[in-house]
Amino acid sequence: MTSESQPVFQVRQLGRTFDLGEVKIQALRGIDLEIYEGEFLVMLGASGSGKSTLLNILGGLDRPTSGDIHFRGHNLSHASDAELTQFRRQHIGFVFQFYNLIPSLTARENVAMVTDIASNPMPAVEALERVGLGQRLDHFPSQLSGGEQQRVAIARAIAKRPDVLLCDEPTGALDSQTGIRVLQVLQDINREFSTTTAIITHNAGIAAMADRMLRLSDGQVSEIQINSDPCRADSLRW
Ligand SMILES: Nc1ncnc2c1ncn2[C@@H]1O[C@H](COP(=O)(O)OP(=O)(O)OP(=O)(O)O)[C@@H](O)[C@H]1O
């Protein structure tokens, strides 16, 4: 990230209230945030602080109930379902804690599911080689370890060459050594393709590999730390 970097996302006074009838839950309360081209952002915060809600809005899976979110100048706040689907398809790759692979498809087929509908995809084999799984192309998820399954999920996310990679606790289900390997893959992709990357984690130590750390508390940004010298993911220990 450089100081001249342009914001990919501009978030202004973003709010999200869930209306459950008798109760209203204010998950986000006036978030102001820029996310810059090519940056690696780590989002921390206690359970219920609003991290997933924010990530879902950034990724066009949800809309704010107040405030605005712009992606490269386009206001997503009032986009239609069809527009959000198009936005996600063209620009966003998601990685979740529990891989969400299709059990009856091989690694290669799981990735190809996405490349079949993308406009300028990376071949599935190349994406799998990129995450170190070139030898496991025809394995089914049940034949792969958790870390390998997560790397298939990352291959699937990067194969459509997204501008933005959004990861919700990508190492949450992994042991530390495997988690570090997965983070190194994400860092390599961020650096090689300048893919803007945001990761939610409960592990504060992961912030050391990020350009910036954002902390949410009770639906608000409570802390932002800029890291002028992010470490390599494979030097992290926890
Ligand atoms: N679909 C929903 N309907 C109702 N309330 C919701 C919904 N999604 C989230 N919330 C509430 O919004 C608040 C923020 O939730 P969110 O999942 O964003 O937190 P989080 O920081 O990601 O938590 P965790 O670390 O536990 O995943 C919580 O109080 C949660 O219960």
Image: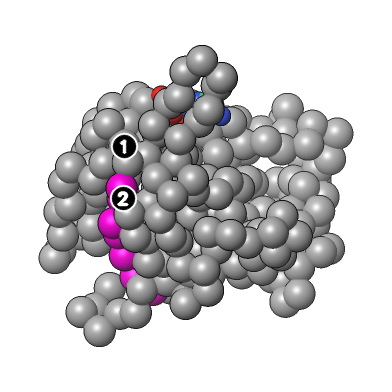
In magenta stretch: residue 93: no
Mark 1 close to ligand 1, CB under 8 Å: yes
Residue 27 position (above or below residue 127)? above
Which residue is situated farthest in the bottom direction here?
4
Q: Which residue position is annotated with label 1?
A: 219
Q: How many marks?
A: 2
Whole-percent x and y of residue 4?
25, 84
Answer left or right for 3 relative to 150: left
**Badge 2: how crowded within 10 Å, few (<14), some, or many (20+)?**
many
Using the image, tell me which numbered label, if any, was put on residue 56. none
Q: Marks 2 and 1: CB-CB under 8 Å? A: yes
Q: Quadrant of residue 220?
A: top left
Which residue is situated farthest in the front direction here?
22
Q: Which quadrant of the picture is home to ligand 1?
A: top left
Callout 1 amino acid: Gly
Q: Nearer the viewer, residue 67 or 49?
A: 67
Mark 2 lies on a secondary structure that is: strand
Mark 1 lies on a secondary structure that is: loop
Residue interval drawn in magenta = 30-39
User: Label 2, label 1: how many angstroms apart (C-alpha)?
Assistant: 8 Å
Callout 2 amino acid: Ile
Using the image, tell me which numbered label, if any, was put on residue 31. 2
Residue 139 position (above or below residue 37)? above
Whole-percent x and y of residue 188?
42, 63
Answer left or right for 235 relative to 189: left
What residue is at 46 percent from the left and 68 percent from the top?
Answer: 70
What residue is at 18 percent from the left and 42 percent from the top?
Answer: 222
Name the magenta segment's main secondary structure.
strand
Answer left or right for 48 relative to 81: left
Q: Is residue 236 at all visible to an observer of this figure?
A: no
